[in-house]
Amino acid sequence: MNGTHPRNNTVTLADYLLTRLKQLGIGAIHGVPGDYNLELLDYIEPAGIRWVGSTNELNAGYAADGYARIKGLGALITTFGVGELSAINAIAGAYTERAAVVHIVGTPPRDSQDGRKMIHHTLGDGDYRHFAQMAAHVTVAQANLLDPRTAPKQIDDALEQCVLHSRPVYVEVPVDVVAVPVPADRLESNIQISQSLPSSAFEAAITKLTERLYAAKQPVILVDCETRPLGIMNGVRQLIESTKWPTFTTSSGKSLVDETLPNVYGIYQGRFAEPETKSFIDNSDLVLFFGPHQSTTNSYSLTALPAPDVTIAFTFEGIKIASDMHRDISTKQALDHLLDNLDFSQLNTEATTNVDLPRGRTVSYSDVSDDQEIKQDKAWRLMGNFIRSGDILMGETGTAGYGVREMTLPPHTRLFTPTTWLSIGYMLPASQGAALAQRELIEASNYHGINDARTVLLIGDGSFQMTVQELATIIRHNLNVVVFLINNDGYTIERCIHGLRQGYNDITPWRYLAAPNFFGASEDTYLGSAKTYGELKQVLQDKKLTNGRGLRMVEVFMDREDAPVGPLMDLLNKQKDKEG
Amino acid sequence: MNGTHPRNNTVTLADYLLTRLKQLGIGAIHGVPGDYNLELLDYIEPAGIRWVGSTNELNAGYAADGYARIKGLGALITTFGVGELSAINAIAGAYTERAAVVHIVGTPPRDSQDGRKMIHHTLGDGDYRHFAQMAAHVTVAQANLLDPRTAPKQIDDALEQCVLHSRPVYVEVPVDVVAVPVPADRLESNIQISQSLPSSAFEAAITKLTERLYAAKQPVILVDCETRPLGIMNGVRQLIESTKWPTFTTSSGKSLVDETLPNVYGIYQGRFAEPETKSFIDNSDLVLFFGPHQSTTNSYSLTALPAPDVTIAFTFEGIKIASDMHRDISTKQALDHLLDNLDFSQLNTEATTNVDLPRGRTVSYSDVSDDQEIKQDKAWRLMGNFIRSGDILMGETGTAGYGVREMTLPPHTRLFTPTTWLSIGYMLPASQGAALAQRELIEASNYHGINDARTVLLIGDGSFQMTVQELATIIRHNLNVVVFLINNDGYTIERCIHGLRQGYNDITPWRYLAAPNFFGASEDTYLGSAKTYGELKQVLQDKKLTNGRGLRMVEVFMDREDAPVGPLMDLLNKQKDKEG
């Protein structure tokens, strides 16, 4: 019996793959049908996974990314060539910002591939490997399931890489291999995710780290966005609560810690920070920097990065103490070890508990006058009053992406904000995926005890036009999404950068509030519109908006030459000076 | 003065590039603004080129492709990373089906590139070459304009490759090089497109070719789609008229010859052809095969290809006589030489002029009964009555792409039909680009003496959803586009292939006729709707539709389990048998 398997312990390759995805928490797969993936799609609903037919593949990719950032892992299925290439920009974004997305591509039958046949969805040159080579640039592992004998192991290996790095992987499934039986025995246990082993390096790093913690006189905690893919959000929260040390986030780290805690001071804005804040951080002798992601756009042009010599950074590569990178150490293990073993009474809390640094100021409904036009200096904080615990808040690249940074968020909210990839059009489909993940978590009673929550999208008109049809998917799956469409007449973020009044930054004016009806929403879908603060306040407090279900949409008018205070406003003022 | 240039004979690099594009016939550039291309966009309108701000980059790519297939060359400008990757599927399609598209990408300043800075729109790994490496798979030449000293030559070389191969090229313009002066002297003459030189191989091929032509007893001319990019459409037409030999096209070659000529018999459909036609071609002793593009989807699964031993193929690689490929011979030169030197009186016309092979049957308005629901067996030919000389007809992948093959087209029409890439969503933005090119040709009095023409898009609901927002660009530029939206409740072409009644082939039902209003069209935009032949006939003869201007839209309802007779109907019947 060597080399054979008992016949009754097999599953189809499709079922193997889908079972693995389900074991890892996947409840829904996004994608678009195409003739090389149809057979695979047959297996999805029977496997107990929801099929989300997106309106196009780029949107499917963005949605899978949004889903992954909430649930930890997302998946999409596209077809060879045309489908996968349409999604590749979304995959690149997931790679850059660490969303764990499994990109499954239905490929032509092996016969066609071996025969280099000139079939549709190829470049016509007989080379079937072009697209996989392109995908390799933006995925952390690739598996081409040509051979059912090795396919289960290939699937497991790719998924492990996806989980470990929280980055996309690329899985090719030839259409004629979908139903081939493979051994099922591996499925009896979950995929083994390899762990860093205990080592003397680990001990040494912990020792050094502990010394620095005990010695710190003016310590600071700084939380960046890779805290999420590192899987250390809970540990970091515990540390913040236990140490009571002054805590800041980066712009993309915002919402990963509870901003309502007394020792949490919001976003550290570098050269845009209040002088006391900047001075406090500049004079700090220890910065615990969790999940750093040091792009210029995520660090106020590198000015919000702590001084390297006082920094201990918890990263995917290891723990970096000043300039010494300690590799092959799990940040999660190290953090857990600290939380279990640290003598918190030895930490310096005195020097920091009396600190009272500036905080983001809220804007209440009584702070604005009703007949005034809506302006970017207060609009975002005013809209912040709308956000409730459990909500997911999505601020699209553009003025919205800067504006959402100003809102003080309740606990258990999650913020999506532009970080590095900054692909406009991302947020709308991502809000579809995020809202679906949110609903799945609520249904599984795994959402902080919250039973009702919304996904709130703030998006400019230019971005909205890019991927607008994904509203149809939100409608079809009856997702709780509230869209605030900022109508400011074009690409204001580009106007801030260059071409303030150039025609190329204009867009076609749409009748935006006609969108839900066009895309098939019921006739009683909530629609709101606001040009003044009075109108905006009324809308924000309308029970049909706040407590409604499904898609709701509000059009908020702002001036085309207005931006949130901070980097964008600085750029805008320079452009205005130039143009006169 | 060696090595220097007179200072007064310079232009900016941007102007150099744009002047070259204009010299090659570019009147409009598609694209989306992004912060690495804004400076370049400043130069477009001043250069006398129209800027078409598309709603997203994939649509811009499709539109540039549609424009290129009508005017010979198209261009789009995207931004680094996010923009270019969104467009890459369109570029791959242009590569596969030979549309000459210049893809210009605005890239980060050279300082950032040299410093491997972690800025936005990069993958964050310091490697700025990923996207160019991806683009190299789907472009025939690449130019990275890092050095203004060599930039003019690089531009000329890339554009020459684009024209020679009628395939996309990739040009990177760092944002800080846009305004740098470069020598202008090359601009005084047009780009030199290298030509194949006269040679003994040329003479030998012509001799063999001429012998075969004179000897042919039952010759046939077969015109395929690469006749267009080869630039031999006029020569082929002359040959058809001079020889009067029986002429067929492939499905994608349709409209490249005048179907109303007595010796033109429409599409040769291989195993779906009428028996007399198949027998005639099978017994032919010479097939002149112009611009072959031998994908399975373009050849009725290879059954519509002529027997190799009787075939003389005029291709990009050279002239292939039976199995002998004669390389380094220009097909255009060879064809021109034949037309100039052939003694047409020596050709066998007798054996072929008396031939009377079956032709596509038209369906006139009196052939259908008014109260009957619209069915695919007659609908397309009925809609064929709508098409006028000069129209561009676009049949999107799906039932429409097969349906348009049944229409008999007036002279000077141009048909877009799925060939090999088959990316659904292509046709709507491509119709925007094609309509713009059509208008430019009419304005230049270079459109067969025709002063008024329309671009007519036939598209299924599933495809329509993919790229729908490009209707806004059609509206904004007031292009003459008539959209027939086939509402058959989902991806019928996929239902024909697999999953006849599976949920994954369903789509969200939209209120399709609300589209023009949503996207900003004027309130009096023509909207029509037809469920019966009577309604369809009325719409098709409505003067507001036939002679109106700008966007017009008609929703045509058909059954979800219906397809044109031929390959799709065969597949559908198999699925129906399977499902019962």
Image: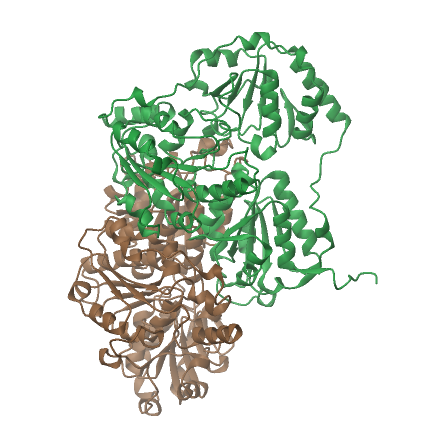
Chain colours: A brown, B green
Left-right relation of B490 to A311: left
Left-right relation of B253 to A469: right
Q: Nearer the viewer, residue A398 or A227?
A: A398
- Can residue B455 be spotted in the picture? yes
**Quarter of the image holding residue B198?**
top right
In the image, residue A341 above or below residue A159: below
Q: Residue at x 53, y 10 (%)?
A: B283
Left-right relation of B165 to B479: right
- The C terminus of chain B lies in quadrant: top left
- The N terminus of chain B lies in quadrant: bottom right
- Can residue A194 be spotted in the picture? no
Q: Nearer the viewer, residue A1 or A561?
A: A561
In the image, residue A295 above or below residue B502: below
- Residue A180 position, x and y percent, is 35, 35
Left-right relation of B29 to A555: right
In the image, residue B570 above or below residue A469: above
Q: Nearer the viewer, residue A62 or A339?
A: A62
- Residue A265 position, x and y percent, is 33, 81
Q: Residue at x 37, y 34 (%)?
A: B398
- Residue B319 position, x and y percent, is 65, 26
